[in-house]
């Protein structure tokens, strides 16, 4: 049997492919070793209310500034009205990856302009 020789193009493709594989493996190992794995750091931002038929829709942005993904994020929005009355709305966000954000909507019957809106994360799961 004769031994097949590789030409310069084949060697170039092999070298580039090997370099990419080694760089990827090196990056993954570096991330696994150097990342301290801080927990999810979640915050809630409520946007400008919009009238939608008989209700008021309020956009909600959930941000995760932490190093871990949060799953099943529970968000509570509260509309505090004059006279001590409150209206509550809830939103569940399935997951918020690290260093990212997710958006959703909550609904209120009362006009949010008549009171004060606040939002908070009430809980989440670690994956």
Image (cartoon, grey):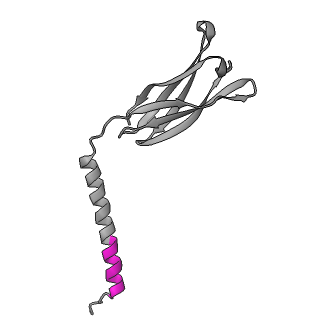
Residue most toward the right?
A: 53
Q: Nearer the viewer, residue 48 or 40?
A: 48
Q: Main secondary structure of the magenta part?
A: helix
Counting from the top left corner in percent of width and height, residue 92 is at 52, 30
Counting from the top left corner in percent of width and height, residue 68 is at 36, 39
Residue most toward the bottom?
A: 2
Counting from the top left corner in percent of width and height, residue 78 is at 56, 19
Bounds of the magenta span? 7-17
Q: Is residue 70 left or right of residue 93?
A: left
Against 120, is 81 above or below?
A: above
- 86 within the magenta span: no
Residue most toward the left?
A: 33
Q: Nearer the viewer, residue 48 or 58?
A: 48
Within the image, what quadrant is residue 87 found in?
A: top right
Task: Give me the residue at 30% from left, 40% from top.
Answer: 37
Q: Is the C terminus in the top left, top right, bottom left or bottom right quadrant?
A: top left
Task: Give me the residue at 43% from left, 41% from top.
Answer: 97
Task: Give me the residue at 34% from left, 34% from top.
Answer: 39
Task: Give me the residue at 31% from left, 82% from top.
Answer: 11
Q: Is residue 86 left or right of residue 66?
A: right
Counting from the top left corner in percent of width and height, residue 108 is at 65, 22
Q: Is residue 50 left or right of residue 74?
A: right
Q: Is the N terminus in the top left, top right, bottom left or bottom right quadrant?
A: bottom left
């Amino acid at each position: 049997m004769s031994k097949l020789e590789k030409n310069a193009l084949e060697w170039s493709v092999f070298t580039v492919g090997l370099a990419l594989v080694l760089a990827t493996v090196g990056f993954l190992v570096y991330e696994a070793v150097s990342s301290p794995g801080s927990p999810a750091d979640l915050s809630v931002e409520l946007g400008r209310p919009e009238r939608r038929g008989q209700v008021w829709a309020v956009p909600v942005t959930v941000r995760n500034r932490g190093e871990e993904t949060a799953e099943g994020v529970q968000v509570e929005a509260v509309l505090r009205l004059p006279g001590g009355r409150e209206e509550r709305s809830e939103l569940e966000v399935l997951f918020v990856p690290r260093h990212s954000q997710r958006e959703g909507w909550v609904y209120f019957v009362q006009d949010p302009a008549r009171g004060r809106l606040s939002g908070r994360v009430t809980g989440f799961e670690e994956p």
